[in-house]
Amino acid sequence: NTHCKSAELQRIMSNYSYLVLASATSPGEMANYSNYTMASHHEAALDLQHTNSMIDFVESNTVKPFIIPIVGLIVGAGMMQVEKVATVGKLVLYFGAQSFMNIFMGWVFRTHVTVHKGFVLPNNQPLEEDLHGCPVGFALTAFQQVISFFCFLILFASLYNTSYKITPKKISTSTEVVSICIFGCVFAMNIALNNFSLGYVSIAVNLIIRSCLPLTTFLSQQTLSLFKLYPEKPCNKLEITLMVCGVLCAGAFTTAKIMGSSASHHSGSNQVLGVAMCICSLLCGSVNLALAGVLGEMKLSVYDTVAYMSLPAFTFLIPFCLIPKPVPGAWPKIFGFSRASDFDILRTVAQISPKTFWLFALSGIFSFAYNIIQFSIVHTLSPSATAFGGNFNKAALVFLTLILPFLQVHKLPGSPYIYWIWAAVLGNVAAFSAYSYLQILAKRQKEAEDAKAEKGFAKQLTGEDEDEQSSSDEESSEDGGFC
């Protein structure tokens, strides 16, 4: 029985390997592989080298984090084809796209093996451990802007003679030019600082800090209102309390994560630097939203944004790429010193790990595609649904990272830090979910009041109110006659 089961398992694995390779090889190579499997069947033996390599790849840290986002993209795209669940499908697709981009950037900056152990260092000693990640947040963001711009040019040329021709918005005033430059610089700094932080902290820490955007946006708006640059927003004590509680929970999560992992991973000081840069990124995002109210909504499409903001953002980021900074992990051993600029790291990576350099180019293509998907989905949903979707995506990804072992690239901290982490996550999600719910209720109430006022104004213009009043008086007099 054991022999029969072994033979049956070999047959199944052989057929499975055949089907997988059939989609990844040329006909000639497929014929050779077919002959190979037939011979192995004849000898009642199967060389599992290729199958084991494939299984090892699927189970590796490279693929594990991307399983959930890819499933989300596939399921969301399928649900969008069914009218009854199309809206939910859009949110699922949004989750898949946003999670994929977050995980991919975190993988590039922190967990991808850039240099394998055994690499000969400048002191002629071999590298004892794999070198993970590539801390080039500013340089990679600038590189992405250029790649996105060329992707736009290719797409623009491809669709020029079709019914889907892209027509960028015309910029005719100096105010619009200034607004685009300001938006482009703040937007680029937001992305660059976020990318920078991913080289020093985990994706979970990054996401939970960025979940504090409502409070920083509120503070930015109130600060601008002091200078008469923004209308003062009413202070709702319950909303402010919820936001502060959410931020305190985020702080507790970050502290517990750093204290619990600093001994086994990057040094605590480098993680603190990553947290500081993530907070600065959050502030830039808040200022960007506040400036939209100050300078006016430009109403640019995703194509307009790429066409007009990419090159100014690239130019703005160049000086930051030349500033030396502390480098994490084993990078000091590669350079022979502990500080290096993004361009120094980028130049070294191009020499010792060309594959990693091409990942940067791929990230620019992914960024362009993600922005198109995000823009297309967001503009077909209500603002409330979009805000809820963004907050849900962050919370869900943090939860999945904590719950599912195959998504944990690094081992979670032990007791007592893990208990603080769970309590902080639950508190953060509960606080900002309640805040989002209050925002949705307030928006619905305002829309109802606006609709009622507009309806009353329309009745006044048409004289419908007077007709209804006279009709009501006549009915009253008739009722009185019958009495």
Image (spheres, rainbow, N blue to C red):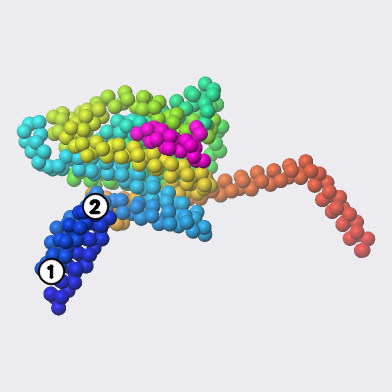
Give the residue type at disc 1: His
- Taking the spot 30% from the left edge, 33% from the top edge, the residue there is 140
Left or right position of 376 against 275 = right
Residue under numbered circle 1: 42
Q: Residues within 10 Å of mark 1 (few under 14, many from 20)?
A: few
Camera sees residue 394: no
Q: Which mark is residue 26?
A: 2
Return the residue found at the far bottom.
1
Camera sees residue 102: yes
Q: Residues within 10 Å of mark 2 (few under 14, many from 20)?
A: few
- Residue 459 part of the magenta segment: no
- Taking the spot 50% from the left edge, 54% from the top edge, the residue there is 87
Please, what secondary structure does the residue beneath circle 1 have? helix
Q: Which region shows up in magenta?
A: 147-168
- Taking the spot 19% from the left edge, 72% from the top edge, the residue there is 8
Q: Taking 30 as reference, is 141 above or below it?
A: above
Marks 2 and 1, how far apart in space? 24 Å
